[in-house]
Image: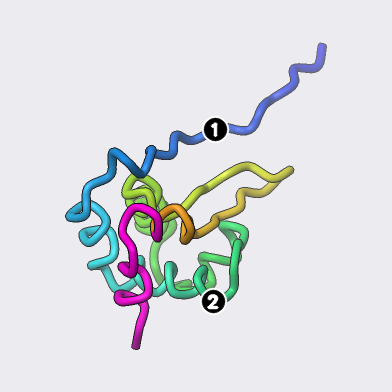
Amino acid sequence: MSRERSPRLMEHPDLEQVELPTVLFALSDASRLALVRELAVEGPRTVEACRETDPDVPKSTFSHHLRTLREAGLIRNEPAGRHRIVTLRRDELEGRFPGLLDAVLRD
């Protein structure tokens, strides 16, 4: 008997409940900031493609970075077939914290 497996859905916070210090903490790590910058430029990417941003980071650390960004409301991590797609929540963040992403992502 075949069991259908559904992709694991992850919770994404409502940005109305996310506080600014949580977002700033998530962006305070250089690896997480680099990933957010990449998503801002490249658009949605698979988790595998995101790992290429800093391939020397251990997988467990990378997973922690993704979780920190997701829980801070910066990204969505959603199933897409056999992969997961990571998307920057730019429009939602702009609505909640106007100008923040542009200010943080500036060189």
In this view, the residue in front, 65 or 102, is 102
Give the quarter of the image for residue 9.
top right
Q: Which mark is residue 41?
A: 2
Q: Viewer-proximal residue, 27 or 19?
A: 19
Instruction: Find numbered disc 1 in the image and state the secondary structure of the residue it sits on.
Output: loop
Residue closest to the far bottom: 107
- The answer to which of 53 and 86 lies nearer the viewer is 86
**How far from the left and from the top, in percent, is residue 59?**
44, 57
Which quarter of the figure is the C terminus placed in?
bottom left
Q: What's the residue at 38%, 38% (across, down)?
A: 14
102 falls in the magenta region? yes
Q: Which residues are magenta?
A: 94-107
Residue bearing the label numbered 1 = 9
The x and y percentages for residue 35 are 44, 69
**Residue placed at 63% from the left, 33% from the top?**
7
> Furthest residue to the right?
1
Instruction: Report the amino acid beneath label 2.
Output: Val
The residue under the point 17% across, 55% down is: 21
| Magenta region, main secondary structure | helix
Image: 26 above or below 18: below
How far apart, in angstroms, are the residues tagged by discs 2 and 1?
26 Å
For disc 1, the neighbor class at 10 Å (few under 14, some 14 to 19, many from 20) is: few
